[in-house]
């Protein structure tokens, strides 16, 4: 059995709630084992809980992320940390009949469920692999999307390096992730919701003792919008920007690998992202 989070805990001083945090930087191997076992255990209930806890909003956020990704018709897109494959299936819709979408996840039960959903759909595959060692050649992918996954990766910098490596020059990375709410009133409500309702409902429905305590805890120890944008730049991405969703509780970051795709769609895509301010601390592209 992998260690439960109690073995990984430390106090989170950023919140008025006494909660644990997972020291990912300190112990990536333990985090990897814990995260994989946890998502494997909750896989069957994951979609139901996602829809209940986000009040169905996650579907809308994912559609928006795929819109920003602008997958080119006929291209190759990855959904990294795919879970049951929502983003891969949405990407495939945009890639058209000749496009290919591949979902990647290291939890076998998630990959199995994703394969069931994608069964019979040409041009969609799901593979069991680690985001820190993507089984794709360098410069081979047009678009990569990560939905609520990167926060769970044990060595985030390693995963960003891998995403950068597999993307074609001019290729686009879109990261949909929980972030830091920008509105104080909303932030207080959100704290209450995520440290009381989410663990309570999550424990009952997932039948996992702490998966839905790990959720708010990992969110609080994740960098905010601007800090994550900086990490993307440090990883070599350019034209980095983000859009806040739900007062910043969720953010979608967009970042391009430098260079221009053949026939210049990369440049056209990068310029087509809306740049209007949606929050006071938004990075402008
Ligand atoms: C919160 S779920 C998100 C699933 C899906 N993308 C969605 O938005 O519904 C996070 C997923 O990331 C996967 N994951 C975490 N670390 C990973 C890694 N290093 N490599 C591959 N998958 C990973 C987990 O197994 C889990 O399925």
Image (cartoon, helix red, strand yellow):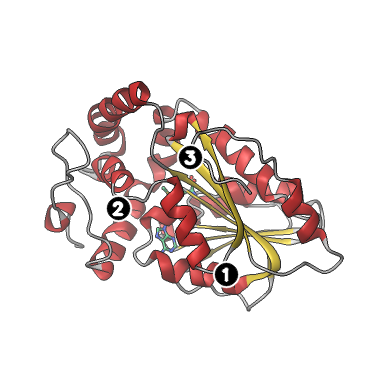
Determine which of the numbered discs, if any, sits on residue 281 in the image.
3
Q: Residues within 10 Å of mark 2 (few under 14, many from 20)?
A: many
Residue 64 locus on image (x, y percent)? 63, 38
Q: Are discs 1 and 3 less than 8 Å apart at CB?
A: no
Residue that carries the numbered disc 1 in the rendered image: 164
Determine which of the numbered discs, if any, sits on residue 38 in the image.
2
Q: Residues within 10 Å of mark 3 (few under 14, many from 20)?
A: few
Where ligand 1 lies, by image quadrant? bottom left
Q: Are discs 1 and 2 less than 8 Å apart at CB?
A: no
Q: Residue furthest right?
A: 263
Decide if residue 52 is on the left or right side of residue 243. left
Mark 1 or mark 3, which has the lower sequence index?
Answer: 1
Q: Secondary structure at mark 1?
A: helix
Task: Count the numbered circles shown.
Answer: 3
Residue 121 locus on image (x, y percent)? 70, 52
Residue visible at 63% across and 78% down in the picture: 138
Q: Secondary structure at mark 2?
A: helix
Residue 190 locus on image (x, y percent)? 33, 27
Decide if residue 185 is on the left or right side of residue 100. left
Residue visible at 31% across and 64% down in the picture: 32
Residue visible at 28% across and 68% down in the picture: 28
Whether residue 114 is visible:
yes
- 148 is higher (above) or lower (below) than 207: below
Comparing 240 with 27, the one in front is 240
Mark pair 1, 3: CA separation: 25 Å
Mark pair 2, 3: CA separation: 34 Å
Residue 81 locus on image (x, y percent)? 48, 57
Question: Which numbered mark, 2 or 3, is in the foreground of this view?
Answer: 3
């Amino acid at each position: 059995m992998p260690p439960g989070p109690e073995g990984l805990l430390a106090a989170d001083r950023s919140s008025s709630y006494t909660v644990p945090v997972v020291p990912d930087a300190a112990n990536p191997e333990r985090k990897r084992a814990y995260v994989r076992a946890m998502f494997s255990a909750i896989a069957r209930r994951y979609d139901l809980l996602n829809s209940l806890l986000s009040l169905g909003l996650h579907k809308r956020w994912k559609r928006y992320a795929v819109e920003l990704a602008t997958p080119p018709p006929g291209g190759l897109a990855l959904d990294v940390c795919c879970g049951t494959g929502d983003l891969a299936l949405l990407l495939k819709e945009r890639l058209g009949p000749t496009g290919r979408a591949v979902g990647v996840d290291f939890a076998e039960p998630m990959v199995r469920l994703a394969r069931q959903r994608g069964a019979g759909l040409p041009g969609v595959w799901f593979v069991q692999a680690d985001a820190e060692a993507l089984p794709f050649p360098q410069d081979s992918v047009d678009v990569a999307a990560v939905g609520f996954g990167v926060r769970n990766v044990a060595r985030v910098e390693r995963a960003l390096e891998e995403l950068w490596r597999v993307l074609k020059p001019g290729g686009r990375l879109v990261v949909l992730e929980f972030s830091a709410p920008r509105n104080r009133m909303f932030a207080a409500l959100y704290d209450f919701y995520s440290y009381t309702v989410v663990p309570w409902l999550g424990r009952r429905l997932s039948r996992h003792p702490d998966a839905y305590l790990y959720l708010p805890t990992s969110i609080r120890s994740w960098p905010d919008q601007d800090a994550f944008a900086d990490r993307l730049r440090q990883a070599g991405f350019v034209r980095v920007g983000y859009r806040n969703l739900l007062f910043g509780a969720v953010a979608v970051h967009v970042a391009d690998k430098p260079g221009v795709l053949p026939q210049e769609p990369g440049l056209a895509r990068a310029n087509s992202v809306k740049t209007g301010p949606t929050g006071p601390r938004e990075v402008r592209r």
